[in-house]
Image (tube, rainbow, N blue to C red):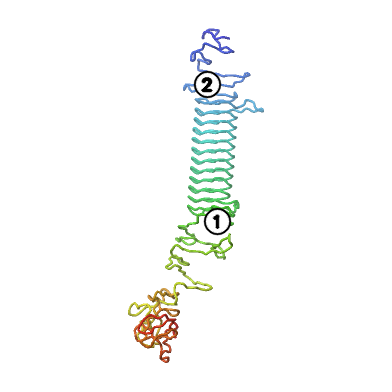
C-alpha cells in the first residue's frame, strides 16, 4: 500500500513503510473518544483509553489487565495472563497515575504508586513503591518494599527492602532484610537477621537473632540482646537464649556480654574480661548501683570470693609494681573522703610494715598552756586529766615523752582515735627523736640515761639513780658536752 490523501477511501498506512507524512497531520489513531486496542492472534495486547484530563491510560499485557473506571494517567506495561495453567491473573490499577510494570495479580490503588513486577503485590499508599517479589504490601504514603515475600511497609516513608515476613510499621522506619523483623518505632531500623524488633523511636537493631530495641534511640545487637531503656546500647554474644536474655536496666547504659572477652587493639582477650592493648584506660567517673552517689572504679562479685587487681608482665613472667594515684591525690579504703595519701577506715592487717617517713611512735595530746616547741619534754598535767604540759622539774616521775618533729624527724606512726582521744601535738612515746637537752648536770654521752631537768622542756643526764626510778625519759644516742642543744635520743620511758 501507499499513502494517499487523508479522508479518501484509499487512505492507508503502507505495510512496507510510508513517506511524505506530516507529524500531527498524519497519524495512526482515532479521532473520537473511544479506546484504541492492538491485538495479536485476536487477543488484546495493548489498550489506550482516552479521558477528559488528556491523561490517557495505557494498558499492556494480557487482556485481563485493567484500569478501574474514573482512573486517569494509569499505566500497565505488561504482565498478567488470561489463562496460565488454567488460571487467569490480572494486573490492576485503580489509583490515578498509578503504574504496574508487569508480573501477575498486582494491584496499585494508591495515587501515583508503582509496582515494578512480581506476584500478588498490593500498593495502596500515595507515591508508594513495590519493586517486586511476592505478596508484599505498601500501604502508606511514600512507603517502599524492595522485594522479597510477605513484607509490609505500612509507616509513612517506611522501607522494607526485602527478605521474608518483615514489617516496617513506624513512620520513616527501615527493615533491610532477613526474616520476621519489625521496625515499629518512628525512624527505627532493623538491618537484617531474624525475629528482631526495633519498636522505640530512633531504635536500631543491626542484625542477629531475637534482639529487642524498645527504648528511644536504643541499640541492640547479637543474640537475645534487649535495649529496653532510652539511650541504652546492648550487645550480647551467642550464649543468649529465650531464658538467658541480656538487657538494660537503666537509661543511657552501654552493656556488653562477651564470654570470650572484649579486646581493644588486640584479639587476645581474657574470657569474660576486657583487655586494652594500647592507649591505656582512663576513667573520669563511674558509679555502682550498690553505692548510691559514689563515683570511681568498682570491683564487684556477688558471691564469697573477693575481687582482685593484678599487675603482671606476662611476657617476662614477673609481677609488676601496682601504682595507685602516683601523679598525686589520696587513696581511701572504706572511705570516700581520704584525708591522707592512704586513708583506711577499718582494721588493717599486714605481715610487716616498713616506715620510711618517720622514726618514732607518737600519739597526739592536748597541751595545757598552748603550743609546746618540738623536741620539748612533756609531763602529765595533774590539773587537766588526759592532757600534758611542759616539764619544769628534775627527775619528774610524771614524765610522758617528747614533742615529736624536731630537726625534721617526723613520727613514723601516729596513734589517734577521732572523737575520743583528740589532740593537737604528737608526743613520741617510743623510737628515735631529737630532744632539747641541758648539760648543766654533766656532759651527755651516747648511752647515758636521760631524765627531766629543772630547765623547762629540757632533758639532762640522770646521775642520781635513786631519784631516776620512774623518771627515765630515754637513752642518749648523741652527745652534748656543755650548754643546751639537741640530742638524738631513743625514747624508753621507765
Question: Which disc number belongs to residue 275?
Answer: 1
Residue at the limit of the structure toward the left, as seen here: 369
Image side of residue 269 versus residue 492, left or right: right
Do the CB atoms of the residues marked 2 and 1 lie less than 8 Å apart? no
Q: Is residue 295 above or below residue 108?
A: below
> Which marked residue is nearer to the observer: mark 2 or mark 1?
1
Using the image as rendered, state which of residue 19 and residue 231 is in the foreground: 19
Q: Quadrant of the C terminus?
A: bottom left
Image side of residue 481 versus residue 51, left or right: left
Question: Which disc number belongs to residue 49?
Answer: 2
Specify the quadrant of the image occupied by residue 120.
top right
Identity of the residue drawn at 59% across and 39% down = 163
Image side of residue 171 versus residue 267, left or right: left
Instruction: Locate residue 430, reporting x and y percent.
Output: 45, 80
Residue 49 can be seen, yes or no:
yes
Identity of the residue drawn at 55% across and 56% down = 275
Circle 1 crowding by C-alpha within 10 Å: few under 14, some 14–19, many from 20? some
Q: Quadrant of the N terminus?
A: top right
Instruction: Locate residue 491, reporting x and y percent.
Output: 44, 81
Disc 1 secondary structure class: strand
Mark 2 or 1, nearer chain start: 2
Amino acid at each position: 500500500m501507499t499513502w494517499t490523501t487523508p479522508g479518501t477511501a484509499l487512505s492507508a498506512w503502507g505495510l512496507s513503510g510510508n513517506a511524505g507524512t506530516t507529524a500531527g497531520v498524519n497519524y495512526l489513531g482515532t479521532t473520537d473518544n473511544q479506546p484504541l486496542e492492538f491485538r495479536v492472534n485476536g487477543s488484546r495486547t495493548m489498550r489506550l483509553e482516552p479521558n477528559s484530563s488528556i491523561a490517557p491510560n495505557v494498558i499492556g499485557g494480557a487482556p485481563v489487565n485493567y484500569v478501574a473506571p474514573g482512573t486517569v494517567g494509569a499505566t500497565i506495561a505488561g504482565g498478567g495472563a488470561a489463562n496460565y495453567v488454567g488460571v487467569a491473573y490480572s494486573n490492576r490499577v485503580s489509583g490515578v497515575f498509578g503504574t504496574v510494570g508487569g508480573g501477575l495479580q498486582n494491584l496499585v490503588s494508591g495515587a501515583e504508586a508503582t509496582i515494578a513486577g512480581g506476584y500478588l503485590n498490593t500498593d495502596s499508599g500515595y507515591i508508594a513503591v513495590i519493586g517486586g517479589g511476592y505478596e508484599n504490601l505498601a500501604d502508606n504514603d511514600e512507603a517502599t518494599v524492595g522485594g522479597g515475600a510477605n513484607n509490609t511497609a505500612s509507616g509513612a516513608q517506611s522501607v522494607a527492602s526485602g527478605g521474608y515476613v518483615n514489617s516496617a510499621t513506624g513512620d520513616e522506619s527501615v527493615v533491610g532484610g532477613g526474616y520476621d523483623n519489625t521496625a515499629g518505632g518512628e525512624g527505627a531500623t532493623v538491618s537484617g537477621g531474624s525475629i528482631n524488633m526495633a519498636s522505640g523511636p530512633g531504635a536500631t537493631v543491626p542484625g542477629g537473632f531475637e534482639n529487642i530495641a524498645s527504648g528511644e534511640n536504643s541499640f541492640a545487637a547479637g543474640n537475645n540482646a534487649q535495649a529496653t531503656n532510652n539511650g541504652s546500647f546492648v550487645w550480647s554474644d551467642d550464649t543468649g537464649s529465650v531464658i538467658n536474655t541480656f538487657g538494660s536496666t537503666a537509661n543511657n547504659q552501654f552493656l556488653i556480654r562477651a564470654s570470650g572477652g572484649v579486646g581493644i587493639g588486640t584479639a587476645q582477650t581474657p574470657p569474660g574480661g576486657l583487655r586494652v592493648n594500647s592507649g591505656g584506660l582512663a576513667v573520669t567517673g563511674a558509679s555502682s548501683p550498690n553505692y548510691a552517689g559514689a563515683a570511681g572504679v568498682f570491683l564487684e562479685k556477688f558471691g564469697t570470693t573477693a575481687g582482685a587487681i593484678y599487675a603482671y608482665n606476662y611476657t617476662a613472667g614477673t609481677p609488676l609494681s601496682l601504682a595507685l594515684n602516683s601523679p598525686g591525690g589520696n587513696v581511701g579504703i572504706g572511705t570516700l573522703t581520704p584525708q591522707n595519701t592512704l586513708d583506711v577506715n577499718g582494721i588493717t592487717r599486714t605481715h610487716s610494715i616498713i616506715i620510711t617517713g618517720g622514726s618514732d611512735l607518737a600519739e597526739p595530746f592536748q597541751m595545757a598552756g598552748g603550743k609546746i616547741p618540738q623536741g620539748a619534754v612533756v609531763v602529765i598535767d595533774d590539773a587537766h586529766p588526759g592532757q600534758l604540759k611542759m616539764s619544769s622539774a628534775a627527775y619528774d616521775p610524771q614524765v610522758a615523752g617528747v614533742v615529736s618533729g624536731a630537726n625534721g624527724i617526723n613520727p613514723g606512726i601516729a596513734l589517734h582515735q577521732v572523737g575520743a582521744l583528740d589532740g593537737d601535738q604528737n608526743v613520741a612515746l617510743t623510737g628515735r627523736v631529737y630532744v632539747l637537752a641541758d648539760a648543766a648536770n654533766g656532759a651527755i654521752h651516747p648511752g647515758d640515761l636521760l631524765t627531766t631537768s629543772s630547765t623547762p622542756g629540757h632533758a639532762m643526764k640522770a646521775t642520781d639513780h635513786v631519784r631516776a626510778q620512774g623518771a627515765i625519759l630515754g637513752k642518749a644516742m648523741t652527745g652534748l658536752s656543755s650548754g643546751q642543744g639537741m640530742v638524738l635520743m631513743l625514747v624508753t620511758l621507765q
